[in-house]
Image (cartoon, rainbow, N blue to C red):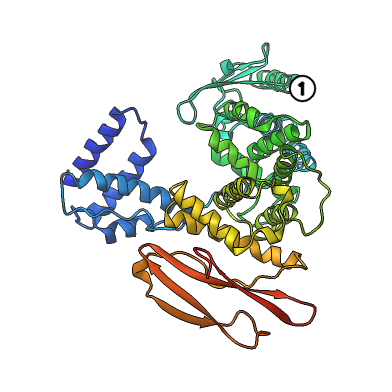
Amino acid sequence: MSRLRTALERYVGMRQGLGYKYDGPARRLAEFVIFMEARSAETITTDLAMEWVTSMGRQPSWSIRLVDVRCFAQHLTHFDPLTEVLPSDAVPPARRTKPYIYSEVEIQALLAAALSLPPADALRRWTYHCLFGLIAVTGLRHSEALGLLRADVDLDQGVLTIREIKFGKSRLVPLHATTIAVLSDYAARRDAHLGTPRSPYFFVAEQGGRLLHQYVHRVFWRLSRQIGLRQEGNRDGPRIHDLRHCFAVQTLINWHRAGEDVERELPVLSTFLGHANVRDTYWYLSAAPELMNHAVRRLDKRWEVSVMRRTNDLAVLIERWFTDRLLKHRGVSSNTIASYRDTFRLLFAFAQTRLGRSPSQLTLRDLDAPFIGAFLEDLETKRSASVRTRNLRLTAIRSSSDMRRSRSRHIAPTFSVCSRYPASDVTNGSFSFSPGPRLKRSWTVRIEARGWDVAITLCYCWPRKRGYGSRRSSTLTETR
């Protein structure tokens, strides 16, 4: 037995002794040890670890492998100082798959197609009809639905018992009366078809055995191609798991339409879905444009304003920027949406304190250079934000400026480079640039390095009816 394999057994035993299941990481690290043994390597190096992490063709698995091998290497550094630990950003982070939100018509078509599965007198068509229907109306994970035992389905009380599936958690899922009727009909057909039960599972294959994941996915792909959700030979498209996403999003939309306090109800949905943390449920708020629209309207209601505004009002443009530009056109990740959302929450709160105005009362002219500079300074001085966090907030504001310029007839600021760097990265001096081809001369921007602060002047050009006129210079950190 190699020294690395002995160390792995000790490491896995330690993690499991702390209460972690650690089955998946243990399996992947065992593959890593085999990889190292094939190369006669006893010490983890950056090159070998990176080769193993990226040896699989699917990039989403790289992040998982990176975390596994980094933790193992960090453990080994206490015993072998020659061990090298991969940096945490060695591979691009995995992006969460954008969910497909089914329409009611598509779900009905999928269930109807399941009832057409051959042969006509078999149990198979009813099994898949009820399985996909149950996932759609309860939001179960498909592994939870496949793992249901007969004893877990209490049709008399109308309750499902989900036992320690993910994160070692169990929960009770109540059923609607119509769902109880469909499942009761399936149980009667199943028992009549099989006679004597051959397995403890509620959903069974034709001969009474357990349904296997790979066969369930193959049937789903066949049905989705049949009803036009997937193209022949295309591996991308709606998934079974998207039925769960659809349930969560539709629940949130229904709460918004009914005027419910969504933030108060989110822990209920989180428990119902079996999430380990309520923040995992918050992700669904950015999963559908309609939910973003509802969230903006609720923000308007909180500030007690009218929804009738001018088309160049800031609140309307920010709403369109989120729903149209970011979600529909660019398809940015949920992490980016959350970061930009937090930026404007902080900005609006700062405007309320500094200007005494609610978000709906702000105009484009309010977001001038002195105001943005004061906001960024407030982040650093009162909230102790780092330079990196400050630049991330500034990036969100600058990103929205493109759409605001295109929507407004009254203001068209031209931005120069605007950020804050460590003083060691710049030198005192000045440089020149041309804000636009219609200007007759270049502008000079003065840079002053003061410790970790760098002042970079912004130049704005305010359009008049004929050409460019009044020119204004200001800086984010002090007035020029």
In the foreground, 208 or 110 = 110
Q: What's the residue at 75%, 53% (across, down)? A: 316
Which SS class for mark 1? helix
Q: Which residue lies furthest to the bottom in this view?
A: 440
* Residue at image mark 1: 178
Q: Where is residue 148 in the image (x, y as percent from the top left)?
A: 57, 24
320 shown above or below 140: below
Q: Position of residue 320 (x, y in %)?
A: 73, 55
In the foreground, 242 or 430 = 430
For the question of whether residue 231 can be seen, the reply is: no
Q: Where is residue 309 in the image (x, y as percent from the top left)?
A: 81, 52
Viewed as shown, does residue 317 lie left or right of 208?
A: right
Q: Residue furthest front?
A: 480
Viewed as shown, does residue 432 lie left or right of 203?
A: left
**Residue 151 quadrant:** top right
Where does the N terminus fall, quadrant-wise? top left
Q: What's the residue at 64%, 28% (across, down)? A: 264
Q: Which amino acid does label 1 sit on?
A: Thr
